[in-house]
Image (cartoon, grey):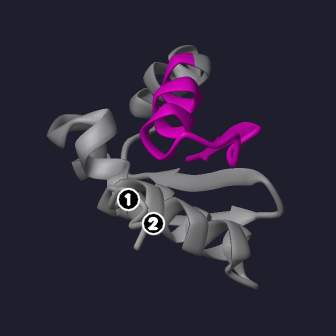
Amino acid sequence: MRFDPPKSLNDVLKEYLDKFPRKHQLKQGMILSYWDEVVGERIASQTEDLHFEGTKLVMRVKNPSWRHEIHANRFNIIKRLNARINSDVVTELIVRA
């Protein structure tokens, strides 16, 4: 009798997600849920109406001065968000005042 070695939970979950029919929407939801963690409490507290328009992550800021701060760091934020879920889901960050 031959037994295959057990798979890690991470591997099993990855296999499941690869077959999940709405994988892209699920990953977008994961990005939204990790927003506060990735950008930190200060930036997260200044953003609202965080949503996707295609592959663009769009948000509004409460104070226009934060628009510049987030816009200046957008490439780093995109990189960190995509790395957090190990997928290139966010292609652009749009900040509206």
What is the three-letter code of the residue carrying label 1? Answer: Lys
Which residue is depicted at the point 58% across and 31% down? 78
The numbered disc on residue 44 is none
Determine whether the residue tagged by mark 1 lies in a helix, strand or loop: loop
Q: Residue furthest left?
A: 41
Q: Is residue 47 visible?
A: no
Which residue is depicted at the point 43% across and 62% down? 4
Question: Depth check: 71 or 8 in front?
Answer: 8
From the viewer's perspective, is 24 left or right of 47? right
The numbered disc on residue 12 is 2
For the residues labelled 1 and 2, say whether their Cβ atoms are less than 8 Å apart.
yes
Which residue is depicted at the point 45% across and 56% down? 11
Kindly identify which residue carries mark 1: 7
Q: Quadrant of the N terminus?
A: bottom left
Crowd class of label 1 (few under 14; some 14 to 19; many from 20; radius 10 Å): few
Question: Depth check: 94 or 68 in front?
Answer: 94
* Count of marks placed on residues: 2
Extent of the magenta region: 76-97
Residue 2 position in % (x across, y down)? 43, 67
Residue 53 position in % (x across, y down)? 78, 64
What is the three-letter code of the residue carrying label 2? Answer: Val
Which residue is depicted at the point 36% across and 56% down? 5
The relative height of residue 85 versus residue 4 in the rendered view (above or below) is above
Q: Is residue 15 visible?
A: yes
From the viewer's perspective, is 56 left or right of 16? right
Does residue 12 belong to the magenta stretch? Answer: no
- Image-quadrant location for residue 48: bottom left
